[in-house]
Amino acid sequence: MENVANNTGQQYLTYKPRLKRQCIILAAASVLSLIAAVLIIFLPTFSIDLLRTDVFSPYLPKIAELDPEVLLSDAPTVNFSVFDEVYAAFAPVTGDDAESLAVFSFTGVFQLFGVIFLAAGMVSSLVSAIKNILHVISPDNYALEMYDKIKSRTLETGRKRGYYFSSSYLILCGVIYEIFAIVFSSIIGRLGGGEYVSSYFAAMTGVNSWCIVLALVLIAVLVLFIWSKTITKQVRLEIMREDYNIEQNK
């Protein structure tokens, strides 16, 4: 029994530096993931060329309240974010007429679910970032806990159970509902109901340079998560090989 304990201790010390490195990488990925979630919602990455759109709805504040100087410029353009899109979708609710409520009812339900999932995704990202930052503060404890989970084969099981509460899954659901809202608004706009549209995406003509910033952050998040997962996988396979060799020697 004492030899088994010594072997286990030696195993842990062998993988400890890599598990601590994985902890730092995962924390960085979590923080960047939170930043990416904020950028996805608030960064004005989408644009509307006012010379190429027929949608001039009073329910789109950035267009309805546009400065006349912008309209007179050579390239009148309006930039908007997902937050602007959500605000525009809920703006008709403040109206006291049946027409405003009817406009909201077309896409408002999808936007409502989209907002719920996107908000939950941001909260999940924040919780994950805080948890992983705390792990960096005590990397030795994190390395020991990770080693124990890998050793007992419970790491993947825990990840599968928590997938539906992960920030990536929640934000993906929010994006899907946003797409439904966009599709319905676009259909209304094409059918000649541009004055009853409460979606900037129905008038969208392209993206702007902010999209590059968002893409770089998302790529960095993806690279860090893959790097973290690769280290974990390598450690797990090495531990399994050592364990099976011990069993075979017996």
Image: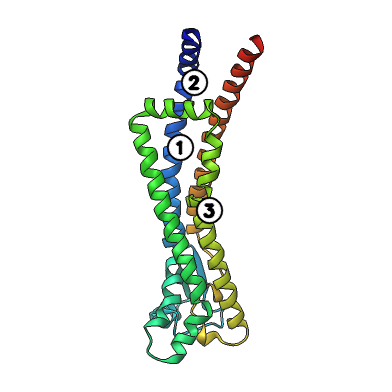
- Give amino acid for label 3: Tyr
Q: Say which of marks 2 and 1 sits in front.
A: 2
| 182 shown above or below 138 | below
Query: Which residue is drawn at the image coordinates 39% and 44% (left, top)?
Result: 129
Which numbered marker is on residue 169? 3
Q: x%, y% of residue 3? A: 49, 8
Q: Residue at x 50, y 57 (%)?
A: 171
Q: Is residue 122 visible in the rendered structure shown here? A: yes
Q: Which residue is mark 1?
A: 26
Report crowding for label 1: few under 14, some 14 to 19, many 20 or more residues within 10 A (C-alpha): many
Q: Secondary structure at mark 1?
A: helix
Residue type (three-letter) at the residue carrying disc 2: Tyr
Mark 1 or mark 3, which has the lower sequence index?
1
Of labels 2 and 1, earlier in sequence is: 2
Q: Which residue is mark 2?
A: 15
Query: Is residue 102 positioned above or below 157 on the image?
Result: below
Mark 3 lies on a secondary structure that is helix
Q: Please give left or right for residue 136 compared with residue 232 in the image.
A: left
The answer to which quarter of the image holds residue 95 is bottom left
